Image (cartoon, rainbow, N blue to C red):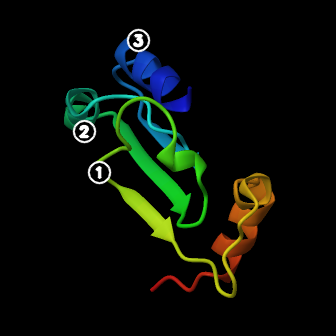
Amino acid sequence: KAILIGDYLSDMYETKNFKIITFGMPRMANYNFYRELERKTNYELMCINLVDDIVPLLGNGINAPFNNLNLIPNGKRLCDPFKAHSIERYQEVINKCKFL
């Protein structure tokens, strides 16, 4: 939903900039849709996924082919799809990341 709303708003308000960040988003569109988003000058998309989160593998379409950040959690991977997809888990993994 965030990608579609951002796309709509970026068309409506061409002088405003939109930065959309998704966490564990399922597949939702085809390559041409994402390519059109990439061409927009007022729209930026970043998709953050945990490698053991099953939700980004679900849906109809493809994942965003640009600006993906796939994070590998330290420690063991979860086999519980509900816990692996929780926003608290995303926060925990991101807080432990060391970015240059």
Specify which label sits upstream in the sequence, 3 or 1: 3
Find out whether the residues at labels 1 and 2 contact each other: C-beta distance under 8 Å.
yes
Find out whether the residues at labels 3 and 1 contact each other: C-beta distance under 8 Å.
no
The secondary structure type at the circle numbered 2 is helix
**At label 3, which amino acid type do we have?**
Met
Along the horizontal axis of the image, is 81 left or right of 53? Answer: right
Depth order, front residue of 84/36: 84
Screen quadrant of the C terminus: bottom left
Q: CA distance from mark 3 to mark 1?
A: 23 Å
Residue 14 appears at what percent x and percent y?
A: 34, 20
Q: Quadrant of residue 35?
A: top left
Specify which label sits upstream in the sequence, 1 or 2: 2
Specify which label sits upstream in the sequence, 3 or 2: 3
| Disc 3: which residue | 12
Name the mark nearer the viewer: 3 or 2: 2
Is disc 3 surrounded by few (<14), some (14 to 19) or many (20+) residues within 10 Å? few
Q: Quadrant of residue 87?
A: bottom right
